[in-house]
Image: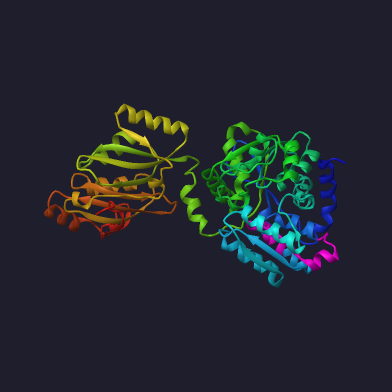
Amino acid sequence: MNLRDRLFESILLARQRVYEVGSATPLESVKADLPFSLFVKREDLGPIKAYKWRGAYNRMAQLTPEERARGVVTASAGNHAQGVALAAGLLGTRARIYMPRPTPGVKQAAVRRFGGSHVEIVLHGDTYDAASEAATEESRKTGAVFVHPYDDLEVMAGQGTLADEVALSGKGPFDVAYLQIGGGGMAAAAACWLKRQYPGIRIIGVEGEEQAGMAAAMKAGAPVAIPKVDIFCDGTAVKRVGALTFELCRELVDEYVTVSNEDVCWAIQTLWEANRIIPETSGALGVAAALKAGESLRGKRVLTVISGANIDFGKIGFITRNSHVGGARRHHLRVRIPERPDALLHLLENVLGDANIVEFQYGKSHPGEAWFVIGVAADDAALAALHARLDAHKVTRQDVSGHDDVAFRVIRYKPELLAHPVFLNLMFFERKGALHDFLVRHVKGRANIVYFNYAYTGERVGRALIGLEFAEPAARESFLRELPATGGGFEACRVVDAPASARLLGE
């Protein structure tokens, strides 16, 4: 019997064991305005909020009494560890679990909660692979059974039961399935089952841009270690895919695609807005790839897996900042305008037009010219139209999307260049034109903008820190007397100290 048939038979046998622990998870339609029908398998609703319990329990339920007495050892970035912990508690065996040091706290706490006194966590190394090497060495020395997170036929068989549930849902057939790949276990098992149930289905393996270990293995003809592994999608951050998973994916997966971290953030936003789902980053890889494919899937029935929801709460802020806005990507342009009053307003009114501006970064550092960083949310057509307008007005600019100083919002300025300055903390109602209206009503013709820090966050109220300078002290005092504390499209405005932390280095 070949490897593919062995896996299929093992999935059949895994059903009985897996459902001793949990029940089938739902298959839901994503209620978004898409050119294709998108279905998500809700593995985020399983016993550990991820699919990994299936494989861990299926493997450990087959331990002999002697093996249970010796205990097990494993390595995991989080979800497999929770599955092993759950199985250890239910089966009455001990588990020593190696996890990378950056493993989110929510996943460490869940391991302890599921396993209780049956588990011990060992934080080792900065990557899954370092943790795995240490766990493998302990298994060799102590005789504890190493429960591999993906390169084990029985572990894969457990994961394959999720595809069995897809077939039993009655919502098929599907034209294409986007399956995320870390080590390749879930993708191999799901593809094995889906291709048997839906012979015409196309299987697309999805990897992060700096996690594409399976695609690298396919190119090399064997598993290879990729030089760098991005850990934003920590659940799929694997340096080398498995030997078994490689053989199976080579036969079963039709194509491999990659998605960016920004694509993943957009997928999470889409899932939240459509179905109120917040998956972990790796859990959204399949959805990200489907959204990226867009029009090429028109009219098709598309299957993806929400593989987990064990997200570190602190990551949500990053996801919000790096998601698309209204389906458009963020782009950052550094544009040059004269350093003089109303130059920015002229740019806004006469050049940028209806561009969807979501960010400003500027600090005065030159007496004659200003370089504003303007963030816009735009699809390809809108971005091309914006560049055409900038060309028509002969506006010098450079694309600084992804530049470190822009990403980290390093806004430097030279305080000695500011004449009679005042800094305002402005809270305004986040609607199109609100910030522009404030500048026209209160700043135009009276002051020069010398500092601007604003980023769209998706909240009802926008926040901006704006620095102004005046020709003379009397003009400054007149402005402050006449500036209302609220009203006219903004919620609050107060004078604050200058942002000393943002001054140019060396002052």
Is 248 positioned to the left or the right of 479 in the image? right
Residue 26 placed where, x, y %? Answer: 71, 52
| Quarter of the figure that contains the C terminus | bottom left
Is residue 47 in sight in this rendering?
no
Is residue 247 in sight in this rendering?
yes
The residues colored magenta run: 61-85
Q: Quadrant of residue 245?
A: top right
Q: Quadrant of residue 91?
A: bottom right
Relative to residue 397, is residue 138 depicted above or below? Answer: below
Residue 265 placed where, x, y %? Answer: 53, 47
Near-viewer residue (166 or 243): 243
Relative to residue 389, is residue 205 depicted above or below? Answer: below
Residue 326 placed where, x, y %? Answer: 48, 43
Residue at horizontal 47 percent and vertical 35 percent from the top = 379
Is 319 positioned to the left or the right of 280 in the image? left
The number of discs equals 0
For this orientation, the residue located farthest to the front is 141
Residue 330 placed where, x, y %? Answer: 44, 41
Near-viewer residue (489 or 285): 285
User: Is residue 68 inside the magenta stretch?
Assistant: yes
